[in-house]
């Protein structure tokens, strides 16, 4: 049982390490935690499968979770809400393209600051589309927070 717990923690910490170093969420060992392959290899109980899914969701932003069809289905996101989120993502991409195109005369730090501000604006706009009840369900899907810093210390700034 301890070995199984360690394997789950290794999977989760690998995903977090990848997310921290590349600023991108990564699937656990290149596969989703709810995949049949992972469930067969680890022989997880239903409770363990659920917890692994929760830990995986904690490595993702709420906005990223709102791109996953299984999450959208569980939240009951309507077609109108999907269109609105797609429009917000398109607007964000258009603004990011404009920032990249109009960067002449600006330092890299200024451009990066503008990019981060636009990403934050886009994420906030997308998170406003679902109802409060839907967002509560989304947060519930993440389960009890896990302290990744206890498992995987942050890399020192180099």
Image (cartoon, grey):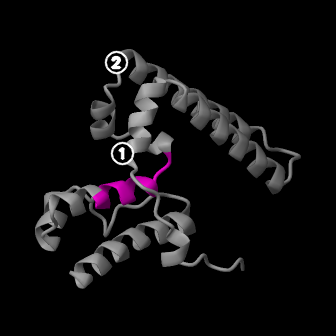
Q: Is residue 154 magenta?
A: no
The residue sitting at 45% across, 33% down in the picture is 135
49 to the left or right of 27: left
The residue sitting at 28% across, 34% down in the picture is 74
The residue sitting at 77% across, 38% down in the picture is 102
Q: Which residue is mark 2?
A: 79
The magenta-colored residue range is 51-61
SS under mark 2: helix
Residue 70 quadrant: top left
Q: Is residue 53 magenta?
A: yes
The residue sitting at 71% across, 77% down in the picture is 157
Q: Nearer the viewer, residue 72 or 83?
A: 72
Q: Earlier in the sequence, mark 2 or mark 1?
A: 2
SS under mark 1: helix
Label 2 or label 1, whichever lies nearer to me, is 1
- Residue 64: image location, x then y, percent: 46, 44
Residue 86 seen from this side? no
How far apart are the alpha carbons under marks 2 and 1?
A: 21 Å
Q: Which residue is mark 1?
A: 141
């Amino acid at each position: 049982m301890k070995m199984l717990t360690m394997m789950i923690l290794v999977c989760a910490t690998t995903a977090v390490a990848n997310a921290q170093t590349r600023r991108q969420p990564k699937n656990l060992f290149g596969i989703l935690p709810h995949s049949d392959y992972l469930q067969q290899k680890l022989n997880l109980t239903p409770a363990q499968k659920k917890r692994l899914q929760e830990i995986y969701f904690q490595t993702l932003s709420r906005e990223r979770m709102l791109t996953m069809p299984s999450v959208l289905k569980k939240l009951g996101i309507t077609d109108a809400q999907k269109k609105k989120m797609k429009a917000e993502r398109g607007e964000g991409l258009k603004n990011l393209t404009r920032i990249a195109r109009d960067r002449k005369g600006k330092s890299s730090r200024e451009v990066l600051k503008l990019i981060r501000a636009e990403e934050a604006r886009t994420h906030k706009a997308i998170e406003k589309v679902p109802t409060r009840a839907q967002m509560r369900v989304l947060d519930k899907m993440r389960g009890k927070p896990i302290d990744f810093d206890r498992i995987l210390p942050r890399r020192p700034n180099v």
